[in-house]
Image (cartoon, grey):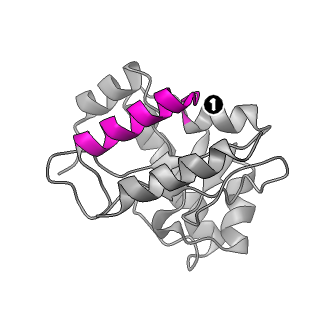
Amino acid sequence: SYLSAAQIAALNARGHEIACHTLMHIDCGQAKGADIALSVDENQKLIQSLGVPTSTTFAYPYGDVSPQAKAVLGDRYRSSRALHHGLIRSGSDLNQAPAVGIEGDNGERLALEWMAQALKTPQSWLVLYTHDVRENPSPWGCTPETLETLATAAQTLGFEVVTYAEGARRAGG
């Protein structure tokens, strides 16, 4: 089920970032540039109608990227994340940024491995994401316990935790 407008506004008020993902979850690797532009414009209008500020970041649906998508989105968003794993460093393409999903049976282990890699890589930035957090998550989500474990690990390891938008701003996007 989807969140209500009130729930989205409450998340925003608590500091959660509400980013763009296209309105109809179109595949940006397959869609025409004009269709991508229309879908993100419609998504922004909906987000703004909820009283949430204009999104400055984007998450590619399905993680699928194309030259036409990057051309449309590059001027609209500070950074757009895909689904390939990696760390963001100086010179990284912020219009196709890597990210690590906290999802499925191995999401926690994978996130912890990438945290360890980030510790060994000075001046790097790690993006972790999930689609939902609940006791019985979707295949693309995680449990509250997993999120708590990762948040505790990040704090213990000395990571500064910021929104994706703030990280992109700091990275020069």
Whole-percent x, y for residue 129 in the image: 45, 49
Identify the residue at image location x=32%, y=61%. 140
Query: Magenta: predominant secondary structure element?
Result: helix
Whole-percent x, y for residue 13 in the image: 38, 19
Residue 148 or 33: which is nearer the viewer?
A: 148
Q: Is residue 55 visible?
A: no
The residue type indicated by label 1 comes to Glu
Residue 50 or 61: which is nearer the viewer?
A: 61
- The answer to whether residue 60 is left or right of residue 18 is right
Identify the residue at image location x=65%, y=35%. 167
- In this picture, which residue range is highlighted in magenta? 144-163
Q: Is residue 53 visible?
A: yes
Whole-percent x, y for residue 60 in the image: 54, 61
Q: Judging from the image, what secondary structure is the residue with disc 1 in? A: helix
Q: Is residue 47 above or below residue 88?
A: above
Give the labeled residue for mark 1.
166
Residue 139 or 47: which is nearer the viewer?
A: 139
